[in-house]
Image (spheres, rainbow, N blue to C red):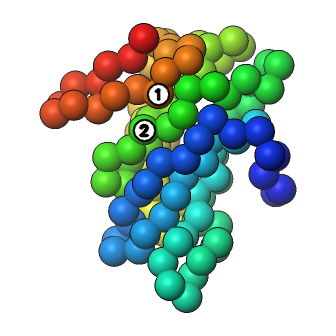
Amino acid sequence: MVANVCSSGQAYCLLQSANSRCNLHLNGLLGARTDVGHEGETIAEYPWPTDYANNIAGPSTRENHVLITSGYNLNQVARLRITLRGAEKVWEQGHVSLICRPVIHGDKIYWS
């Protein structure tokens, strides 16, 4: 899959001592390694396409978990577990943050 140029931003993930970045782009989430010797290797992809190409709110991370959210046709927030073998959905809820990335503070998640 070729990631589209449109992006809502990147978030840092720590995966089994391998540094990585997760990017929520036009069609979903893309995780890539950034550690020396593995730069740019894709580790995870998760489909998250929206109508009108609007993945505006960026991803939020804690360790190897990523929160993604979008309104429009999805109206969901999802928690994904990212490993060196891919992305796995942990849960999905019918809540949404349209323009701001979720904030993780302690054991709570906040969005607007």
Q: Is residue 76 visible?
A: no
Tell me which amino acid carries mark 1: Arg
Give the position of the C terminus as an image quadrant: top left
For label 1, count other residues whose C-alpha is less than 10 Å away and answer few (under 14), some (14-19) or many (20+): many
Which quadrant of the figure has residue 51?
Answer: top right
Determine the residue positioned at 59% across, 77% down: 39
Answer left or right for 61 relative to 54. Answer: left
Determine the residue positioned at 60% across, 48% down: 23
| Residue closer to the observer: 91 or 10 | 10
Answer left or right for 54 relative to 16. Answer: right
Q: Is residue 44 visible?
A: yes
Coordinates of residue 5 in the picture (x, y in percent): 80, 46
Q: Secondary structure at mark 2?
A: strand
* Residue farthest toward the left in the current orientation of the protein: 106
**Residue named by callout 1:** 101
* Residue farthest toward the bottom in the current orientation of the protein: 37
**Residue named by callout 2:** 60
| Total marks in image | 2
Compare marks 2 and 1 and give the one earlier in the sequence.
2
Coordinates of residue 44 in the picture (x, y in percent): 59, 58
Determine the residue positioned at 32% across, 46% down: 62
Q: Are marks 2 and 1 in contact (CB under 8 Å)?
A: yes
